[in-house]
């Protein structure tokens, strides 16, 4: 029932050090169940999804220690291969445990993740790939059970470069007999980070970050120490927030090369961005131009930044068009942006955004993670008092967002709403 109360209209100013990427930390934590000794994973953000993943590891029997952003997983005591349904329901990414548990213990049982507000999100590529590696899959009453005495290397071609399926299959393949080739693999930086972690554990992987990924199976994985890459989506959201409020922001501890498509679009709209080795600086300037974009698998424009970037486009001069090419229903934030005065029409996967002079404050509700971030950006840019409800969605992917924003001069308070107030 938490909400942000935001008094908007002030530019964000200052410096922020980026924390580790949720979407890299989650599969790496899942992969740690395959190691035979403990794994020390550094740069793990303190987020709801990460807490659920840790709860799952503990429910499986692992011992997990957390000290600041360092998480140590002791997988030696894992006794169960059943991912509890109540935890599976809390986070779709628990599907990442399928490949690792199957590869290490020869079986896994989990409940099928449901659809979500951004689209159907099926797991057919995961299942097809796992089956191609030689597993037997039974599906009953919403449960998926996969078993295999051994997995065997094979060639899998993904219909679409799915991030999750690439990760699941890569994890399953590292302990399979022989060579696995994944064609049309996703190339996201989080895939490269997972491959780096697995290589640190002794896996043989080539081609991570390229379209064809080759895994040579090994018999054992050992423990390792790994540093998670910085979160490019949080970094991108903060840059967009600075741009939308006409602020100036320096991000440190980032990898500018992971944000190439966003930085290109910011420059295209006319907002200066400077990049150094692990630093990005942005100077928000008004007015800026509208720009068209298509979301694409990496290195294209990330679907996870589509909603926050749309908020920026609502304030641009002229008309912008977005084509959402990755998920079929990722425009749930549009109605709420309209309530703040945005002029947006949506037709299937295309959104047409006509720039307005300013957004107005309102009470709005987040219904998904990145759509929620878009509403926070809108409330920061709108003059007056807004309230963004539905923080449980935003908390899944942004660590202490109110604290970071206050450090940058924003007027943001986290409040607990009583049920009557909602
Ligand atoms: C990951 C990210 C998410 C991001 C998305 C796309 C994590 C934890 N989450 O999600 O933040 O928005 O990548 O960059 O890393 N698909 C199928 N069948 C499958 C799998 C996927 O049809 O078995 C489709 C999906 O419905 C979607 C597209 O493929 O339309 C891409 O999805 P995918 O890359 O798998 O996204 P996730 O891994 O779930």
Image (spheres, rainbow, N blue to C red):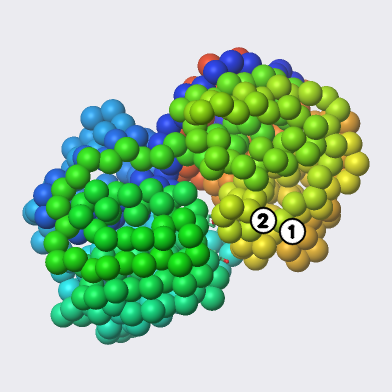
Q: Please report the residue visible at 55 percent of the width from the left and 40 percent of the height from the top.
A: 257
Q: Distance between the residues labelled 2 and 1?
A: 6 Å
Q: Where is residue 308 in the image (x, y as percent from the top left)?
A: 66, 41
Q: Position of residue 279 (x, y in %)?
A: 54, 26
- Residue 323, which numbered label? 1
Q: Please report the residue visible at 62 percent of the width from the left and 42 percent of the height from the top.
A: 260
Query: In the rendered structure, are the residues bearing label 2 and label 1 in contact, judged by CB atoms less than 8 Å apart?
Result: yes
Q: Which residue lies furthest to the front in this view?
A: 206
Q: Mark 2 points at which residue?
A: 295
- Nearer to the camera, 240 or 380: 240
Q: In this view, does 156 lie to the left or right of 13?
A: left
* Quadrant in the picture for residue 97: bottom left
Q: How many residues crowd around disc 2 within 10 Å: few (fewer than 14), some, or many (20 or more)?
A: many
* Residue 345 vertical placement versus 305 (above, below): below
Q: Where is residue 213 in the image (x, y as percent from the top left)?
A: 41, 65
- Residue 209, which numbered label? none
Q: Is residue 106 left or right of residue 389?
A: left
* Residue 248 vertical placement versus 146 (above, below): above
- Nearer to the camera, 274 or 343: 274
* Residue 225 visible in image: yes
Q: Going from the N terminus, do you reach mark 2 or mark 1 first? A: 2
Q: How many residues crowd around disc 1 within 10 Å: few (fewer than 14), some, or many (20 or more)?
A: some
Q: What element carries label 2?
A: loop
* Residue 353 visible in image: no
Q: Which residue lies furthest to the left in this view?
A: 77
Q: Position of residue 285 (x, y in %)?
A: 79, 23
């Amino acid at each position: 029932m938490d909400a942000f109360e935001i008094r908007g209209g002030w530019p964000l100013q200052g410096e922020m050090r980026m924390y580790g990427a949720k979407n890299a930390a989650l599969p790496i934590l899942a992969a740690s169940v395959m190691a035979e000794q403990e794994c020390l994973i550094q740069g793990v953000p303190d987020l709801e999804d990460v807490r659920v993943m840790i709860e799952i590891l503990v429910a499986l029997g692992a011992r997990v220690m957390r000290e600041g952003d360092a998480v140590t997983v002791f997988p030696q005591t894992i006794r169960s291969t059943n991912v509890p349904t109540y935890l599976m329901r809390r986070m779709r990414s628990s599907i990442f445990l399928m490949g690792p548990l199957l590869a290490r213990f020869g079986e896994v049982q989990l409940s099928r993740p449901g659809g979500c507000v951004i689209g159907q999100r099926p797991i057919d590529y995961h299942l097809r790939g796992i089956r191609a590696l030689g597993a037997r899959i039974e599906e009953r009453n919403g449960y998926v059970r996969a078993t295999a005495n051994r997995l065997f290397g094979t060639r899998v071609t993904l219909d679409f470069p799915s991030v999750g399926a690439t990760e699941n299959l890569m994890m399953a393949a590292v302990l399979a007999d022989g060579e696995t080739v994944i064609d049309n693999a996703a190339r996201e930086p989080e895939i490269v980070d997972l491959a780096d972690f697995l290589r640190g554990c002794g896996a043989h992987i080539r081609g991570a970050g390229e379209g064809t990924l080759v895994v040579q199976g090994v018999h054992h994985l050992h423990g390792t120490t790994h540093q998670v890459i910085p979160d490019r989506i949080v970094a991108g959201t903060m840059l967009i927030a600075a741009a939308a409020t006409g602020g100036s922001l320096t991000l440190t501890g980032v990898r500018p090369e992971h944000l190439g498509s966003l930085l290109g679009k910011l420059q295209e709209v006319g907002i200066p961005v400077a990049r150094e080795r692990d630093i990005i600086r942005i100077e928000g300037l008004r007015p800026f131009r509208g720009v068209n974009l298509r979301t694409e698998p990496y290195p294209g424009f990330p679907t996870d930044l589509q909603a926050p970037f749309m908020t920026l486009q609502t304030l641009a001069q002229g008309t912008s068009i977005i084509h959402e090419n990755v998920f079929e229903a990722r425009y749930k934030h549009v109605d709420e942006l309209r309530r703040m005065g945005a002029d947006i029409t949506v037709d299937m996967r295309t959104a047409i955004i006509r720039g307005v002079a300013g957004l107005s404050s309102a009470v709005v509700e987040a219904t998904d993670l990145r759509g929620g971030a878009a509403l926070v950006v809108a409330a920061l840019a709108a003059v007056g008092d807004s309230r963004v409800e539905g923080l449980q969605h935003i908390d899944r992917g942004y660590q202490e967002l109110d604290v970071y924003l206050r450090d940058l001069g924003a007027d943001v308070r986290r409040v607990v709403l009583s049920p009557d107030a909602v």
